[in-house]
Amino acid sequence: MQAVSRLRGFWPGMITARSNSNRSSDRLLYWLLVPVFVVSILPIVRLGFEGVMVGGVPSFDYFRDVLGNGSTWQATANSLYTAGLGTIISLLIGGSFAFLVALTDVRAKAALVFCFMIPMMIPPQITALSWVQLTGPSSALLNAFGIAPAMGSPQPLYSAEGIALLLGIQHASIVFLTLRANLRMLPREQIEAARLAGARGGRLWWQIILPLTSPGLIAGTAMAFVTALGNFGITAMLGIPANYATLPTLIYQKLAGFGPSVLGEVSVLAMLIGAIAICGVALHHRLLSKRDYRLMGMVGRPLDIRLGARRPMIEGILWTVLVAILVVPLLALIATSLVPAFGVKLNFDNYSFAAFREVLFVQPSTARAFQNSFMLSVGAAVTLVLVCLPLAYVMVRRPSRLTKLINLLVEVPYALPGVVLAIACILLFIRIPLLDVSLYGTLGIIFIAYLARFLVIALRPVMNSFSQLDPALEEAAQACGAGLGRRLRDILLPLAAPSAAAGALLVFLTAFNELTVSALLWASGNETLGVLIFNLDDSGDTVLASAVAVMVVLVVIALMSCFQLASRRLPKGVVPWQT
Amino acid sequence: MADINLSRITKSFGDYRAVNQVSLDIADGEFVALLGPSGCGKTTLLRLLAGFEEPDGGVISLGGQVVADPQSNIMVTPEMRNLGIVFQSYALWPHMSVARNVGYPLEVRGLGRAERDHKIKAALDTVALGPYADRSPTELSGGQRQRVALARCLVMEPRAVLLDEPLANLDVHLRETMQQAFLDFHRRTGATMIYVTHDQAEAMAMADRIAVMDKGHIRQMAAPETLYREPADLMVAGFVGAGAVLPISNVSITDDRTCSVRLGDTDVAARICPNFVRNRAAAHAGQAGICLRPEDVWVDDAGALRGSVEDCVYLGGRFRLSVRIGQDRDHVLPVYANRRARIGENVGLKVSDGWVFDRMQGEAA
């Protein structure tokens, strides 16, 4: 899910707008940029200071301590290994799906795409939980069929390769989305010209299609890597039991174990992971800048390579892969949530909904988590949409150097791994300057972190919709005598409303499932759903964790279906999986 | 309705001067076309007039009221200028019905419901769209949408109606119908209309006067027939109407209005630009040219001007030949003929009229 908007963020410059002469009433709009700056940029700046100040004095002690520690480098190596291997897996799965769906005449493309997007929208901790429930000796699903490995045999996913596999599956959709967007821009004529020139089969793929789609491949790879690097849900659920630390889990364990006293140390770790992410993005830009393949010709007439007799077979393979990476793990999750007690063999007579009743109505902490996550995500969605409507207007219709800078900066809290933002927020809000109030350990700090992190998710659809809006629509109202406020109310708001609603829903969906940021910011009494699943699993309440996870998955699929149904009424580019 | 006066208006985008020292006076009720190739500054001029752009220098006044004067820091916003605009893209609001689109200016002005409905109905009837009041604009055809946009202008009783290439998105057949609709509208309402287009046929068919623009300047402003018969310079001669401009060196001025020009081996009688008479030196500096329209040149075997046919196109009823003439065969004349000619055929031409002018340079005076 995070990756969806990150993906848009990689093309920030696609907004064209006619600049308008400034008028004094408009200048009020610029004040909006102030809170955006405070929430999005200030925490990151504060983080930068922390690493080089010890007790208010400039010093590199933290750097020396942390970088001199072997565990730092072990975690870095682990992060790079799992993220790297995971990216290769994403590239294989997502790449082949993209090529087959975008270029060939396989049937039921919409259904394929929708199902392929679900793994990305399901929070990573649930992915991890469901796969753990699928493999290993205590799997309820395998036990029900009597094919589980013998008791005592190791859980194969508790390993570096297990982490990489799940990272690969989780982020395959990112590669798929970027590559498919690229492939759809590929005009039919270029392929046809190559065929007329005599290129066939492998040569056509290797010499024409692949080079033309390399920008999409590179962008998808970079995004999958950076997202995998920042992933906390999978690396924590699989790595911590295996004692296999990556940078995000190392930060989590240090902070969970020692509290704010290790803030200086974890700041350096956060900067380290941030630096690796920035290197990934920079490398991607460098590679891309060397290939300027402007695709000429009619866009919108995508290729339909005929598969002929092989079509049923290829369709079979695609759906089998989907069943394997999506349906089977979810079945395992559902099976676990239905067992009457952990370890009992599930059959049609003894299944029970007790776990659902327990988490919904009995346990106060689970009910509270539902309530917290609901409040946080609704609050974030509503606040962000209210801010984003005027903000997007300023950025699209009154572009200036300042708005272009803001346009880049709002990406930062989202593009950086979540742990980086979390640490940055703790540093800034543990004692708010001037007010002398601490937000640490309250819901407030999570709320602010959500605002920073998800601003860009709400902003992009609205900006998209404003920039697709003919400026003449607004000018016509102006000529009719309508002032700025009136134009916003009568013309712009109604026309941008569908995109704003879509942005709000996306924020809700993302925030409702969020784990990485809240894992570092929560305190007892204000746990979120993501934290709840993580904690329940951690304390051995796997059945309860699975029940919560099943409900979350249902919410995710329901919301995605809403998008799918509404997609025709939304402007282009608002629904993440439709280009 | 009101006079519109622009005085020495300048507007730059970065280093690019889109409008350069343009002065223009438009009388109440006039239909003026701004004509020019793309990028000539005509749309910018319209947007300056509407108030969407602020001039860098110069004064714009509407009916005696100064609405833009950067030197005195005056800039009346578009919403306060009371000008109607018809956009190329129609700019109808898709979330409002046709009636609400048309009535929006009245809504903004706070008119009562009954009065509003009455005026909306009258405006829609003017453009013959009465029965479409409750439709959504998306259900209408391009021409109908443009008429709704026109009704929206009409209802606010603007000082002038500005039209920015309103027919560019319509197909050829519809364009003619819409031209007629604009003309009817103009006759019935007597509104001042300023019409931006790059299509000279459109401008000539509708406008009382046409301002030909190029590179930010107005090259000539005159009635369509004057533009066609008496272009002021090379750019106008080439842009308006078919024909050819030949450089000439030998002009013997007969009187204030006529002259005789040496073309090939023959003398041709032509009309002459008064400027030219006043400024005879130009003739000797190689600054003179003659504009020949195809209907003034006839194929006549007895004609002393000889040339070879390069191309022959049937137009229905007559042929248009391209005839290469001159000692070095370096000029091509479009000529109408009643019979088909072979490519390469040697023909004689007779010139019955021409227009001699002295501004052969690209720069405006």
Image (cartoon, helix red, strand yellow):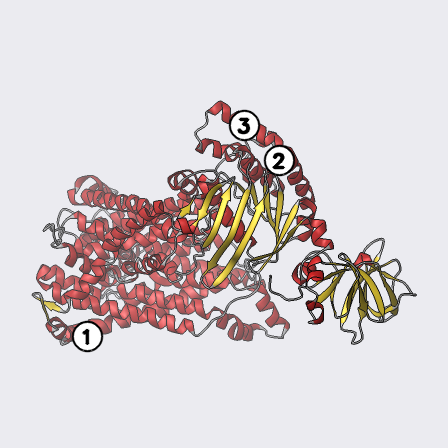
Count of numbered circles on the image = 3
The chain ID associated with circle 3 is B
Q: Foreground mark, 2 or 1?
A: 2
Q: Position of residue B36 (x, y in %)?
A: 61, 56
**In this orientation, which residue lies closer to the viewer: B17 or A576?**
B17
Q: Foreground mark, 1 or 3?
A: 3
The chain ID associated with circle 1 is A
Circle 2 sits in a helix, a strand or a loop, which is it?
A: loop
Task: State the CA–CA distance, disc 2 to disc 3.
Answer: 18 Å
Query: Do the dots labelled 2 and 1 sit on one chain?
Result: no
Label disc, if present, on residue B119 of the rendered structure = 3
**Which residue extends farthest right?**
B302
Q: Foreground mark, 2 or 3?
A: 2
Mark 1 in CB contact with mark 3 (< 8 angstroms): no
Label disc, if present, on residue B190 of the rendered structure = 2
| A276 lies left or right of B322 | left
At label 1, which amino acid type do we have? Trp
Which residue matches tag 1? A73
**In this orientation, which residue lies closer to the viewer: A184 or A356?**
A184
Circle 1 sits in a helix, a strand or a loop, which is it?
A: helix
Q: What residue appears at the point 29 percent right and 54 percent down from the top-left corner? A: A123
At label 2, which amino acid type do we have? Gly
Label disc, if present, on residue B110 of the rendered structure = none
Task: State the CA–CA distance, disc 1 to disc 3.
Answer: 77 Å
Q: Position of residue B98 (x, y in %)?
A: 54, 34
Q: Position of residue B7 (x, y in %)?
A: 52, 50
Quarter placement of the N terminus of chain A: bottom left
- The answer, for residue B38, to whether it is visible in the render is yes
The chain ID associated with circle 2 is B
Q: How many residues crowd mark 2 within 10 Å: few (<14), some (14–19), many (20+)?
A: some
**In this orientation, which residue lies closer to the viewer: B232 or A102?**
B232
Query: Do the dots labelled 2 and 3 sit on one chain?
Result: yes
